Image: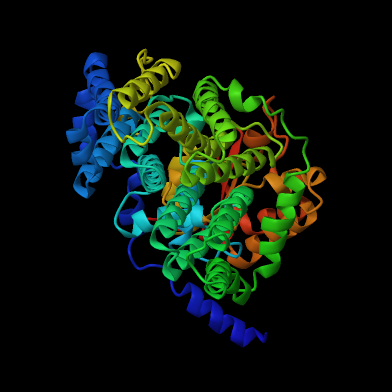
């Protein structure tokens, strides 16, 4: 491609930076207080008041699920479309009521949060993945999930991140409800929502309450499952299979780790379609072609845009080749799935229900309704693929366990349906079904410690920061004083929080220089180092921050500073002037801007 044509394509893809002021998008140091915060603060100022609201909402959901299994009139009301909406709104309120104290916390729950904020700020100006920003093992869609709220006027800060996480988690619960209602009935669907709601509501482990790589693919895969169930009920309409395919194509670009889950769900969709006796063979293969075509839509759009921008090699090395390197580590033992203090009891209890139901499915295989039998097998296939996805990176990170929340619940739901069929027959409601529902829900509450909640201290950790601002940091003050909103800051090290707490955007495509600092860990290390220097030369960011010693060396000194990378040291020493040193961080301004005075 000739340079002039490539320049024209880049201009068309990127355009000019948004004319809207970054300050209006990101706020002053991203600390603008949402108006709802003072009200919520009053609600949790007293622990009894907070628990009365949060636990009251959880118990209301659980009680409704049990009573509706016992009382025909209540079941009929809640099984209507309006009743389902009311029930799900109560589920959403219970989730928000329990999790909202995490929203204003200024403490970083994980580097994912600060990384996504920084990349979303950059993507508002420069939106081409792997050319303008590189989310490493996370896909570009996890960045774009924050771009949409920003375009709608939301502040790009930790508050918005955690709200988005809860909304995606509720979406997954709603999809689970829909899938269970379509496969079985609304009574079982209401029971299905209770265990994951309790887990997501009461957990206080930071890996489970932050906006990481997991909530978006979990939501997308849950929607895929619900659409497969709807397609089964509707005779496999082509548009639904197109939608399933499009979402399947999105999953690898939300989180590459979710590919095994994606493949398992696609396999379930294909087998369900091919096994259908209601459609002629030709129609089945036509819909299978629609499904396959749908999976190509998003990859072609994203990879096509990246290729036109000249970034296909970067996409391949950084996202595909590097992922294979990342997966070469030894796999953690499977028991780590059950050893987490929060997730372990949840998984073990639902696993017991799933095994009990599985025994019934196996022993009554020919007599049990086909829907229950097929749903159980499909859920088992998806859960096995999920465990494989959790194991794939070779690291026992707790946040990976979130992938299993919906699959283990789906398998347990199919098992519960089999148990109810054995005990209560085909009756939707009644005394026997009500007793089983009560036993199931009460056990969930006890096993998951929902009745003995700890004293959350989220608010004390964060609200003071919203009232009084962040602790003084000379580096943040110097960046804000020397760089205009929307100007670029390159960071050497692992401190994306400096992009969050200043009105700057990324100066290079790297959210962290992990791969550049540890070339011996990665055969692509030379590529990443050369790319970083290339970005510094081409983008000419207005500022440069050396946070390497603070990122990589915990024992003091300046190990890991930019001087350890000679090619980068040449660029910095030639083109930048030191402005501020603090702790082990050094902030530089481009030499031609060193004397300018900002208003």
Extreme-front residue of the structure: 367
The quarter of the displayed image where residue 167 is located: top left
Identify which residue, 24 or 117, lies in the foreground: 117
Whole-percent x and y of residue 23? 33, 54
Residue 499 visible in image: no
Does residue 517 appear to the left or right of 79 in the view shown?
A: right
Q: Quadrant of the C terminus?
A: bottom left
Horizontally, is 67 left or right of 199 in the view? Answer: left
- Identified at 72% across, 49% down, the residue is 516
Residue 517 percent across, percent down from the top left: 73, 44
Q: Residue 413 falls in which quadrant of the image?
A: top left
Name the residue nearer the viewer: 32 or 45. 45
Q: Position of residue 468 (x, y in %)?
A: 30, 30
Measured as percent of width and height from the top left, residue 386 is found at: 60, 41
In this orientation, does residue 337 appear? yes
Which quadrant, please, contains the N terminus? Answer: bottom right
State whether residue 459 is above or below residue 4: above
> Is residue 366 or residue 151 the one in the foreground?
366
Measured along the vertical axis of the image, is residue 137 above or below residue 236?
above
């Amino acid at each position: 491609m000739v340079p002039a044509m490539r320049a024209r394509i880049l201009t068309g893809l990127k355009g000019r930076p948004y004319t809207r002021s970054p300050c209006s998008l990101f706020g002053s140091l991203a600390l603008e207080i949402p108006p709802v915060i003072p009200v919520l603060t009053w609600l949790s100022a007293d622990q009894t008041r907070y628990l009365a609201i949060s636990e009251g909402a959880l118990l209301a959901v659980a009680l409704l699920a049990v009573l509706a299994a016992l009382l025909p009139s209540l079941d009929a009301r809640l099984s209507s479309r309006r009743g389902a909406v009311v029930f799900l709104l109560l589920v959403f309120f219970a989730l928000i009521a329990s999790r909202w104290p995490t929203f204003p916390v200024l403490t970083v729950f994980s580097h994912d949060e600060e990384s996504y904020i920084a990349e979303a700020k950059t993507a508002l100006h420069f939106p081409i993945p792997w050319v303008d920003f590189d989310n490493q093992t996370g896909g570009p869609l996890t960045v774009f999930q924050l771009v949409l709220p920003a375009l709608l006027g939301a502040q790009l800060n930790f508050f918005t991140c955690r709200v988005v996480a809860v909304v995606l988690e509720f979406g997954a619960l709603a999809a689970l409800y829909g899938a269970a209602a379509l496969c079985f009935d609304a009574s079982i669907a209401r029971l299905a929502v209770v265990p994951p709601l309790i887990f997501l509501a009461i957990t206080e482990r930071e890996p489970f309450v932050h906006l990481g790589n997991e909530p978006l693919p979990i939501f997308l895969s849950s929607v895929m499952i619900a659409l497969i169930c709807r397609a089964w009920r509707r005779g496999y309409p082509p548009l639904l299979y197109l939608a399933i395919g499009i979402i399947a194509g999105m999953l690898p670009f939300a989180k590459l780790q979710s590919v095994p889950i994606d493949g398992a769900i696609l396999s379930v969709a294909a087998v369900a379609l091919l096994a259908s006796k209601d459609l002629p063979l030709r129609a089945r293969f036509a819909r299978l072609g629609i499904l396959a075509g749908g999976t190509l839509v998003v990859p072609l759009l994203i990879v096509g845009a990246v290729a036109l921008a000249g970034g296909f090699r970067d996409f391949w090395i950084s996202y595909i080749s590097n992922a294979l390197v990342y997966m070469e580590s030894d796999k953690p033992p499977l028991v780590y799935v059950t050893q987490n203090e929060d997730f372990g009891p949840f998984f073990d209890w639902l696993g017991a229900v799933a095994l009990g139901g599985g025994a019934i499915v196996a022993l009554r295989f020919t007599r049990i309704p086909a829907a229950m039998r097929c749903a159980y097998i499909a859920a088992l296939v998806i859960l096995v693929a999920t465990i494989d996805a959790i194991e794939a990176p070779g690291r026992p990170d707790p946040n990976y366990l979130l992938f299993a929340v919906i699959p283990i619940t789906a398998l347990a739901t199919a098992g519960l349906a089999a148990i109810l069929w054995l005990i209560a027959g085909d009756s939707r409601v009644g005394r026997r079904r009500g007793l089983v529902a009560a036993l199931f829900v009460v056990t969930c509450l006890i096993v998951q410690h929902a009745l003995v909640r700890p004293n959350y201290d989220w608010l004390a950790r964060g609200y003071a920061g919203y009232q009084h601002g962040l602790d003084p940091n000379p580096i943040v003050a110097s960046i804000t004083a020397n760089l205009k909103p929307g100007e670029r800051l390159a960071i050497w090290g692992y401190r994306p929080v400096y992009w969050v707490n200043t009105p700057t955007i990324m100066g290079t495509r790297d959210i962290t220089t992990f791969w550049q600092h540890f070339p011996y860990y990665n055969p692509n290390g030379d590529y990443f180092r050369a790319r970083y220097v290339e970005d510094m030369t081409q983008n000419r960011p207005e500022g440069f921050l050396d946070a390497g010693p603070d990122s990589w060396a915990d024992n003091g000194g300046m190990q890991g500073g930019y001087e350890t990378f000679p090619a980068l040291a040449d660029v910095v020493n030639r083109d930048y002037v030191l402005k501020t040193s603090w702790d082990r961080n050094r902030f530089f301004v481009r030499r031609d801007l060193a004397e300018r005075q900002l208003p």
